[in-house]
Image: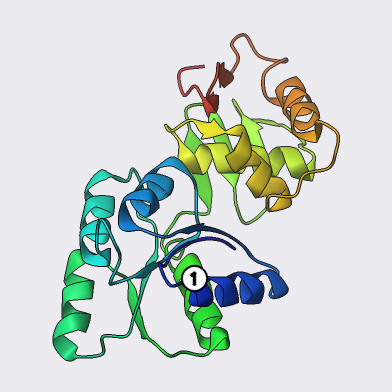
Amino acid sequence: MHLLVVEDNALLAGNLADGLELAGHSADFATDGVLGLHLALQHHYDVLIVDLGLPRMDGLELCRRLRACAPRRIPLLMLTARDSLGDKLAGFDSGADDYLVKPFALEELLARCSVLARRHTLHQDHVLAIGSLRLDRRARSAARDGQALGLHPAGYQILLALAEAHPRVLTRSELTQVLWQGEPPDSDALRSHCYQLRQKLDKPFARPMLLTVHGVGLRLDPQA
C-alpha cells in the first residue's frame, strides 16, 4: 500500500515510518492539516491516516474538505487519543471510514488499512470501460475496439492506474509509485514502459488514446 500519514507527533510518525517500511509499504508524511489536504488532493494514496488534533487545520476539517474536493473517495482512518463516543461519531460524520484510538498496535493499524484499501473496490465491476477501451481487472487483460492488446505487466499496471484515475492526469511520480513503490530503477524505465504501451494501445489505431499533458503527466482520451 501507499499511504499518507498526517501526524504532528514526530516520535509517532517516525515509528510509523519504520513499521510501514518493514511491512513493505510506502508512505508520505505531513505534519499539519493544510499540507495533508494538499498532498491528498495532488497524489494517489490507497489509504489516509489522519490524526484528529493537527495544527493549522484539524483532522475533522481536513476530512470534510477532502470529501468535498477529492475526485474519488479515498479511504481515511482517523487516528487519535480521543476515545469518547462523541469524538468517534464526529469523526464518522466528517467522512472518516474508520477510527483507531491511541495507543495502538502497528499490526492492528496495518490490518485496518488493508481492509480499507480493499473495501472501495468491492462493488466495482471487474470490467472498466473508458471509451473504446476495456480493462478486465479479474483477467488482467485489456482490449481496444474489441482487439486484445497483449500488454506487458508493467504496461497493464500503467493503463489500469490511468483508467481508474480517469479523467484526472497522473503525474510521473504517481506512475512511478504504481510500478515501483517509489523506488524506480536508475534508468528512465517509466519512459520505456510508456513507449511500449503506446505501441500496443495507440499505434494500430487511428487516434492516440494515451495523451501527454506537458509539464504534468499522462491521461486517457475517451474520445479516441
Where does the image place residue 174, in percent across and percent down from the top left?
A: 58, 41
In the image, residue 100 above or below residue 151: below
Relative to 35, is 110 on the left or the right? Answer: right
Relative to 19, is 7 on the left or the right? Answer: left
Where does the image place residue 8, in percent across and percent down from the top left?
A: 40, 67
Residue at the spot 53% in from the left edge and 54% down from the top edge = 126
- Residue 40, visible in the rendered structure: yes
Front-lying residue, 25 or 33: 33
Q: Please count the marks in the image.
A: 1
Q: The N terminus lies in which quarter of the figure?
A: bottom right
Front-lying residue, 150 or 147: 150
Where does the image place residue 193, in percent across and percent down from the top left?
A: 77, 32
In the image, residue 206 above or below residue 102: above
Give the colour scheme shown.
rainbow
Residue at the spot 35% in from the left edge and 54% down from the top edge = 73
**What residue did someone put label 1 on?**
10
Residue at the spot 23% in from the left edge and 51% down from the top edge = 65
Residue at the spot 16% in from the left edge and 75% down from the top edge = 90
In the image, residue 60 above or below residue 214: below
Residue 56: quadrant of the picture? bottom left
Inspect the image, locate mark 1, and give the three-letter code of the amino acid beneath it: Ala
Relative to 5, is 155 on the left or the right? Answer: right
Relative to 77, is 143 on the left or the right? Answer: right
Residue 32: quadrant of the picture? bottom left
How many neighbours does mark 1 have within 10 angstroms: few (below 14), some (14-19), or many (20 or more)?
few
Q: Secondary structure at mark 1?
A: helix
